[in-house]
């Protein structure tokens, strides 16, 4: 099965090359400025490690953000427990049967491995354990809509990133500037990493990439330092 990198997500603004601080109002992509007043789906950004689960109907492969990414052994073992071939076969039945052969679509689940020993502060998400949380599903060339992603998460018994609300980019920026508490962390004082903004219908830019952006809490905290 082919590894398909999850696309790079640009923050809303460009950065100063010397200080790495955001240049407020200097949009990183013209699409963000054009769509800034539309309502985007704002999902909590999780501070973990990017994971993809690939399934072709018979076998399961687990990968990281890139084809060469190394997954810690303790996380890989956890993922292998969660994503068995039998469980995925029950969730993704074959599209057709022909001459006793089963024909499946190619499925990729994208999510985040998070918890203790994963990123600084990971133990504030889960103190003594690790887990996987889903944020996107691709079947062949189709990115699934949010309701389908939620249905798959439910069928597999896994978490899905919380939707914080629907916001324009200025509203989302203000929301992150004010800070907000993570909805998935065991530590009820743990501030969320930020927001990921997506369009409900999966709008694409001219290169064919989905239009997605992120707003990180730390970026706005750093403006005052």
Image (spheres, rainbow, N blue to C red):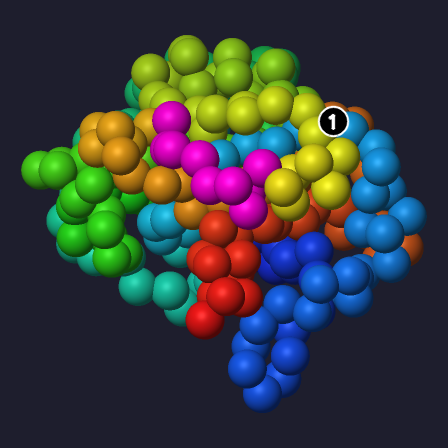
Q: Position of residue 11 (x, y in %)?
A: 64, 57
Q: Position of residue 191 (x, y in %)?
A: 36, 41
Q: Position of residue 180 (x, y in %)?
A: 44, 35
Residue picked out by circle 1: 200
Q: Secondary structure at mark 1?
A: loop
Mark 1 Cα-neighbour bin, 10 Å: few <14, some 14–19, many ≥20: few
- Give the residue displayed 81% in from the left and 51% down from the top: 32
- Give the residue displayed 52% in from the left and 52% down from the top: 216
212 relative to 216 in the view: left or right: right
- Give the residue displayed 55% in from the left and 46% down from the top: 177
In this view, the residue in front, 208 or 211, is 211
Q: Is residue 36 above or below residue 86?
A: below
Q: Is residue 137 above or below residue 156?
A: below
Q: Is-magenta flag for residue 33?
A: no
Query: Range of the magenta residues?
Result: 175-183
Q: Position of residue 171 (x, y in %)?
A: 70, 36
In this view, the residue in front, 218 or 178, is 178
Image quarter for residue 40?
top right
């Amino acid at each position: 099965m082919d590894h398909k990198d999850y696309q790079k997500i640009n923050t809303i603004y460009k950065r100063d090359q010397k200080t790495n601080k955001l240049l407020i109002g200097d949009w990183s992509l013209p699409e963000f400025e054009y769509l800034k007043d539309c309502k985007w789906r704002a999902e909590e950004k999780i501070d973990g490690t990017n994971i993809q689960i690939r399934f072709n109907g018979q076998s399961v492969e687990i990968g990281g953000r890139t084809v060469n990414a190394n997954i810690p052994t303790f996380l890989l073992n956890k993922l292998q427990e969660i994503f068995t071939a039998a469980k995925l076969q029950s969730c993704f039945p074959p599209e057709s049967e022909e001459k006793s052969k089963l024909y499946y679509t190619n499925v990729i689940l994208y999510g985040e491995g998070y918890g203790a020993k994963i990123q600084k502060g990971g133990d504030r998400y889960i103190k003594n354990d690790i887990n996987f949380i889903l944020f996107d599903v691709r079947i062949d060339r189709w990115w699934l809509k949010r309701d389908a992603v939620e249905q798959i998460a439910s069928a597999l018994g896994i978490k899905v990133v919380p939707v914080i609300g629907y916001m324009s980019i200025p509203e989302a920026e203000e929301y992150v500037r004010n800070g907000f508490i993570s909805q998935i962390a065991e530590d009820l004082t743990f501030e969320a990493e930020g927001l990921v903004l997506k369009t409900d219908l999966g709008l694409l830019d001219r290169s064919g990439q989905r239009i997605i952006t992120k707003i990180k809490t730390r970026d706005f905290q750093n403006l005052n330092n």
